[in-house]
Image: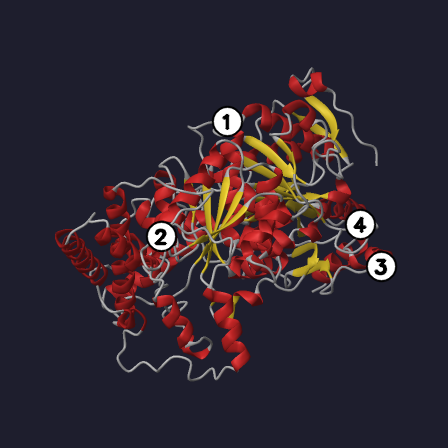
């Protein structure tokens, strides 16, 4: 992968507010903006300093903000999260990078037992403004533990907020909003989409962090996705349109709390819903959406809510990931089943 | 003061110790050897017999008034502990975590701290809480089930009790890193952090990682390990091959073993360690060698796994008695003083009982309150639906 080089003059004061950026670069600029805005914002993680992180998301930040604000930490995820808790109590706003999705589990105890519960335990006397950035999902041909989708564990945990960006503009704004949030935020980054480009207006008023968004209007069925599956769903909607099928595509953006009002509104019109996610389906975000939609849209549904997901297996060897991951054809197949119900 | 037997066997019909365990002779000897002596490196300034002794590296100037204060602290917190234990037996608390036997370790460490220092406790640190100015009544709700700790951790510089073993060690390391990043370390006015955990916790990854973090960031952190010899039923040899204080060397900082039943030695060593940290020479590990004289919690039964001999031996090392002997021998305290402390203890116990039995149950809304700092509309809807459901019962229509 090409490490992006930072154009500092652009980052500090954009010459043109609208730029074409990768998700990776947009995250980098968003982190930089957050660090400039608040001296209490610090970065913590493995290899995030000189190296700029294995995905270069923090590229150049240690050089410009120093080793005390961009910490190359010892190699232990519980340590990263556990010390971030103490720093947050001390008044800092730590942004922790977990190098890969499958490495978050050593930090799981601290996330679930302390990060998620301290505000509740102390009834608001301690806040946990911590962001935990997680590059997640598959499709990059990696070895085991580098392609997982663990978001449901965290969405299932009260006290945490969970979001995922799907495009550069959201990447730029959502990371800053997550850092501004006084609640702990798990920030899932679609690693296989890091180098996809899109326009970012750094002066535009961003939407709210915890809101879903309709990306494409349609009338025949609704697709709901988040993170890396948003691109897949948009591609599927384009392909379906060529066959005369009109699909509405909603980017969830927030997984906890779920913002399903746009989904309910959509399903009441289309009567059909397909949820797309890389994570295994059982007890997942997709399951939760299906449950809530049947509760809220019972009389509008023309077909059962269908889920297109990874399988209920560990993530397979990467030669099999094309079969494991939902793709355009599997999404369209589910749409066909829904329409034919 | 009540007799030692009453500390550990509040129920008159309690089974005699160690009948269930039936240990072998080897186990008896190994157990006694492991807990008998702290070894040659043990820092002690006041022997179990109340003799003042010197130590080449650690000493302390203590005024009669200061020592009377430490004595009073220990007697009062022991009374709190025994009252709370009894309140559990009477059904007023769901569970209690006794500190009996660890009064000197906690009062010594707690009184070494300054107001500007921060403390991260485990869940047995009632004595530390006392020294941080937290009313013992504030500990009760945790064990009665009405709250999860009500004190303000920032104002009191005393973190909430942490129940997941070892979690707080990393949290303390992070806080101490923050003290350093804030430029509050490096001179006499510097700040430091103390972290409390037990011998069992030393096997946890978080404690190991806390050692690593504090070391590589030179954090002003005193790791205060109360080795009370037992992690519920598991002895320290199930946690470590070598004395716990020696572990510090592997992480690159000093480790000191102090007589945890000696309030003077604990105070002296902890003051030194905190000063080292506030000057930028942290971290430091202190192993306070002590003994858990009661059960792990009120739900535990130590007679199943340890020997009555061991308990009997440790009764002779009582942290309070040795101070009393010394105060009397030095003529630093008279019977009026001791009677006064007893009267204070009686009053405190009464207040505790009164408070506990009158604690109201929290309202149903409390389930939902403060889960998030910035709210969650889905949770608020769930709350409203539930409260609406509950209010139907309140109307008496069901």
| Rendered image: mark on residue B183 | 1
Circle 4 sits on which residue?
Answer: A139
Query: For the residue carrying disc 1, how many other residues have a C-alpha within 10 Å: few (<14), some (14-19), or many (20+)?
Result: few
Real-space Cα separation, disc 4 to disc 1, in angstroms: 45 Å
Real-space Cα separation, disc 3 to disc 4, in angstroms: 10 Å
- Residue at mark 3: chain: A
**Label 2 close to label 1 by CB (< 8 Å):** no
Q: Quadrant of the C terminus of chain A?
A: bottom right
Please say whether residue B151 is visible from this viewpoint: yes
Please state which of the two labelled residues, at mark 3 or mark 1, is closer to the viewer. Answer: 1
**Label 2 close to label 4 by CB (< 8 Å):** no
Q: Nearer the viewer, residue B28 or B157?
A: B28
Real-space Cα separation, disc 3 to disc 2, in angstroms: 70 Å
**Label 4 close to label 1 by CB (< 8 Å):** no
Say how many tags the image has: 4
- Image point (24%, 43%), residue name: B64
Real-space Cα separation, disc 3 to disc 1, in angstroms: 53 Å
Please state which of the two labelled residues, at mark 4 or mark 1, is closer to the viewer. Answer: 1
- Residue at mark 4: chain: A
Disc 4 element: loop
Q: Position of residue B59 (x, y in %)?
A: 40, 42
Q: Is residue A327 left or right of residue B22?
A: right
Circle 3 sits on which residue?
Answer: A320
Disc 2 element: loop
N-terminal of the two: label 2 or label 1? 2
Disc 1 element: loop
**Label 3 close to label 2 by CB (< 8 Å):** no
Disc 3 element: helix
Circle 2 sits on which residue?
Answer: B46
Query: For the residue carrying disc 4, how many other residues have a C-alpha within 10 Å: few (<14), some (14-19), or many (20+)?
Result: some
Q: Is residue B41 left or right of residue B325?
A: right
Q: Nearer the viewer, residue B368 or B247?
A: B247
């Amino acid at each position: 992968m090409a490490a992006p080089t930072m154009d500092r003059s652009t980052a500090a004061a954009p010459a043109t507010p609208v730029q074409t950026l990768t998700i990776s670069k947009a995250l980098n600029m968003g982190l930089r903006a957050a660090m400039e805005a608040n001296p209490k914002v610090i970065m913590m993680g493995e290899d995030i300093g000189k190296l700029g992180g294995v995905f270069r998301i923090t590229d150049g930040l240690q050089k410009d903000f120093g080793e005390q604000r961009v910490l190359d930490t010892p190699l232990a995820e519980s340590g990263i999260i556990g010390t971030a808790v103490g720093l947050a109590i001390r008044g800092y706003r730590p942004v922790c990078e977990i190098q890969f999705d499958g490495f978050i589990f050593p930090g799981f105890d601290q996330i679930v037992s302390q990060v998620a519960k301290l505000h509740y335990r102390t009834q608001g006397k301690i806040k946990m403004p911590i962001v935990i950035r997680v590059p997640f999902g598959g499709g990059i041909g990696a070895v085991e533990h580098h392609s997982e989708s663990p978001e449901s564990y965290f969405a299932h945990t009260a006290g945490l907020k969970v979001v995922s960006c799907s495009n550069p503009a959201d990447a730029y704004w959502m990371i800053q909003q997550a850092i501004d949030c006084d609640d702990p935020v798990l920030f899932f980054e679609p690693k296989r989409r890091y180098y996809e480009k899109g326009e970012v207006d750094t002066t535009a008023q961003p939407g709210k962090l915890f809101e879903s968004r309709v990306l494409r209007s349609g009338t025949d069925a609704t697709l709901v996705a988040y993170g890396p599956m948003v691109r897949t769903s948009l591609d599927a909607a384009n392909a379906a349109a060529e066959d005369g099928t009109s699909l509405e595509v909603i980017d969830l953006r927030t997984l906890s709390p779920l913002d399903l009002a746009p989904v309910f509104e959509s399903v009441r019109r289309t009567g059909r819903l397909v949820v797309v996610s890389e994570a295994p389906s059982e007890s997942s975000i997709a399951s939760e959406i299906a449950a809530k939609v049947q509760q809220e849209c019972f009389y509008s549904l023309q077909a059962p809510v269908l889920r297109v997901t990874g399988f209920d297996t560990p993530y397979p060897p990467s030669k099999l990931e094309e079969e494991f991951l939902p793709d355009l054809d599997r999404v369209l197949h589910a749409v066909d089943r829904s329409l034919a119900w | 003061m009540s007799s030692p037997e009453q500390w550990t066997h509040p129920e008159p019909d309690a089974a005699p110790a160690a009948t269930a365990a039936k240990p072998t002779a080897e186990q008896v000897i190994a157990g006694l050897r492991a807990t008998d002596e702290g070894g040659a490196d043990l820092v002690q300034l006041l022997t179990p017999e109340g003799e003042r002794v010197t130590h080449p590296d650690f000493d302390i100037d203590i005024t009669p008034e200061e020592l009377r204060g430490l004595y009073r602290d220990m007697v009062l917190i022991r009374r709190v502990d025994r009252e709370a234990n009894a309140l559990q037996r009477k059904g007023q608390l769901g569970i209690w975590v006794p500190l009996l036997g660890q009064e000197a370790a906690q009062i010594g460490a707690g009184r070494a701290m300054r107001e500007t220092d921060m403390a991260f406790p485990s869940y047995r640190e009632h004595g530390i809480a006392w020294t941080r100015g937290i009313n013992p009544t504030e500990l009760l709700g945790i064990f009665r089930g009405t709250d999860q700790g009500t004190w303000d951790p920032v104002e009191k510089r005393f973190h909430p009790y942490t129940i997941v073993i070892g979690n707080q060690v990393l949290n303390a390391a992070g806080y101490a890193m923050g003290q350093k990043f804030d430029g509050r370390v490096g001179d006499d006015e510097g700040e430091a952090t103390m972290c409390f955990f037990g011998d069992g916790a030393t096997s946890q990854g978080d404690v190991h990682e806390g050692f690593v973090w504090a070391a590589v960031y030179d954090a002003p952190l005193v790791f205060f390990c109360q080795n009370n010899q037992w992690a519920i039923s598991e002895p320290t040899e199930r946690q470590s091959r070598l004395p716990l204080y020696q572990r510090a060397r592997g992480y690159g900082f000093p480790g000191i073993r102090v007589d945890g039943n000696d309030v003077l030695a604990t105070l002296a060593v902890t003051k030194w360690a905190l000063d080292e940290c506030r000057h930028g020479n942290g971290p430091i590990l202190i192993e306070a060698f002590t003994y858990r004289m009661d059960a792990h919690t009120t739900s535990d039964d130590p007679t199943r796994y340890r020997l009555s001999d061991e308990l009997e031996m440790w009764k002779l090392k009582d942290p309070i008695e040795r101070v009393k002997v010394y105060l009397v021998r030095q003529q630093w305290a008279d019977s009026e003083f001791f009677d006064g402390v007893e009267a204070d203890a009686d009053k405190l116990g009464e207040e505790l009982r009164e408070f506990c039995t009158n604690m109201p149950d929290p309202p149903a809304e409390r389930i939902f309150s403060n889960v998030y700092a910035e709210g969650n509309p889905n949770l608020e809807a769930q709350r409203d639906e539930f409260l609406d459901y509950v209010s139907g019962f309140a109307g008496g229509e069901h």
